[in-house]
Image: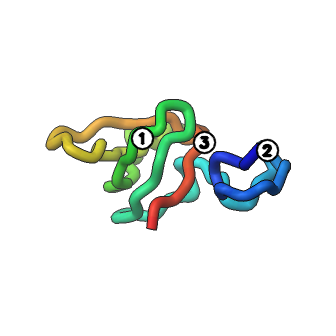
Amino acid sequence: MTCPPCNQNCRQGRDCPARKRVWNMQPGQLFRLLRTGEVYQFVRRDHVTTSGTRNIVVRRGASEETSLHHACHVVRVE
Protein backbone atom coordinates (compact mmCIF):
# COMPACT_ATOMS: atom_id res chain seq x y z
CA MET A 1 0.00 0.00 0.00
CA THR A 2 1.42 3.39 -0.97
CA CYS A 3 1.35 6.51 1.13
CA PRO A 4 -1.01 9.05 -0.54
CA PRO A 5 1.10 12.12 0.30
CA CYS A 6 4.43 10.88 -1.01
CA ASN A 7 3.32 8.08 -3.39
CA GLN A 8 5.81 5.70 -1.83
CA ASN A 9 5.59 2.71 0.44
CA CYS A 10 6.74 4.71 3.47
CA ARG A 11 4.07 3.40 5.93
CA GLN A 12 4.47 6.52 8.05
CA GLY A 13 0.91 7.76 7.73
CA ARG A 14 0.49 10.91 9.80
CA ASP A 15 4.28 11.16 10.26
CA CYS A 16 5.00 11.19 6.52
CA PRO A 17 7.50 13.97 5.74
CA ALA A 18 5.53 14.97 2.62
CA ARG A 19 2.39 15.73 4.64
CA LYS A 20 2.04 19.37 5.69
CA ARG A 21 -0.59 21.65 7.18
CA VAL A 22 -2.07 24.79 5.66
CA TRP A 23 -0.08 26.90 8.14
CA ASN A 24 3.16 25.60 6.50
CA MET A 25 2.24 27.03 3.08
CA GLN A 26 3.68 30.25 1.66
CA PRO A 27 1.89 32.66 -0.71
CA GLY A 28 1.86 31.34 -4.27
CA GLN A 29 2.36 27.66 -3.39
CA LEU A 30 0.06 25.03 -4.86
CA PHE A 31 -1.13 22.20 -2.63
CA ARG A 32 -3.60 19.32 -2.63
CA LEU A 33 -6.06 18.95 0.23
CA LEU A 34 -5.74 15.33 1.36
CA ARG A 35 -9.35 14.98 2.49
CA THR A 36 -10.90 15.90 -0.86
CA GLY A 37 -8.02 15.76 -3.35
CA GLU A 38 -8.77 19.29 -4.59
CA VAL A 39 -5.86 21.53 -5.59
CA TYR A 40 -5.58 25.04 -4.12
CA GLN A 41 -3.18 27.96 -4.31
CA PHE A 42 -2.26 29.71 -1.08
CA VAL A 43 -2.88 33.47 -1.42
CA ARG A 44 -2.28 35.11 1.96
CA ARG A 45 -2.86 35.15 5.68
CA ASP A 46 -5.34 37.67 7.03
CA HIS A 47 -5.01 38.67 10.66
CA VAL A 48 -8.70 39.18 11.37
CA THR A 49 -8.52 39.48 15.15
CA THR A 50 -5.83 39.70 17.77
CA SER A 51 -6.12 35.95 18.34
CA GLY A 52 -7.05 34.67 14.87
CA THR A 53 -5.60 34.26 11.41
CA ARG A 54 -7.52 33.36 8.27
CA ASN A 55 -5.71 31.41 5.54
CA ILE A 56 -6.97 32.68 2.18
CA VAL A 57 -6.77 30.26 -0.76
CA VAL A 58 -8.13 29.90 -4.31
CA ARG A 59 -9.29 26.52 -5.59
CA ARG A 60 -7.93 25.52 -9.00
CA GLY A 61 -10.48 26.46 -11.66
CA ALA A 62 -12.28 28.95 -9.41
CA SER A 63 -11.97 32.71 -9.33
CA GLU A 64 -13.25 33.53 -5.85
CA GLU A 65 -11.15 33.34 -2.71
CA THR A 66 -12.08 31.15 0.22
CA SER A 67 -10.48 30.16 3.51
CA LEU A 68 -9.27 26.86 4.93
CA HIS A 69 -8.69 25.82 8.52
CA HIS A 70 -5.02 26.18 9.45
CA ALA A 71 -4.63 22.51 10.46
CA CYS A 72 -5.95 20.90 7.25
CA HIS A 73 -3.63 18.16 5.98
CA VAL A 74 -2.12 19.06 2.61
CA VAL A 75 0.63 17.99 0.21
CA ARG A 76 2.55 20.47 -1.93
CA VAL A 77 2.05 20.22 -5.68
CA GLU A 78 5.13 20.98 -7.75
Residue at the image point whose x is 35% and y is 45% from the top: 56
Q: Nearer the viewer, residue 10 or 14?
A: 10
Q: Residue furthest top?
A: 36
- Find residue 16 and name its label: none
* Sequence-wise first label, 1 or 2: 2
Asked if the residue under mark 2 is in contact with the one under mark 3, i.e. CB atoms within 8 Å, the reply is no
What residue did someone put label 2 on?
Answer: 13
In the displayed structure, does residue 22 sit left or right of residue 55? right
CA neighbours of label 3 inside 10 A, class few (<14), some (14 to 19), many (20+): some
Q: Residue at x 46, y 60 (%)?
A: 77
**Observer able to see residue 50:** no
Residue 66 is situated, as x and y percent measured from the top left of the image, at 30, 36
Foreground of the two, 51 or 19? 19
- Pick the quarter of the image with the C terminus: bottom left
Q: Which residue is mark 1?
A: 54
Q: CA distance from mark 1 to mark 2?
A: 27 Å
Amino acid bearing label 3: His
For mark 3, what is the residue?
Answer: 73
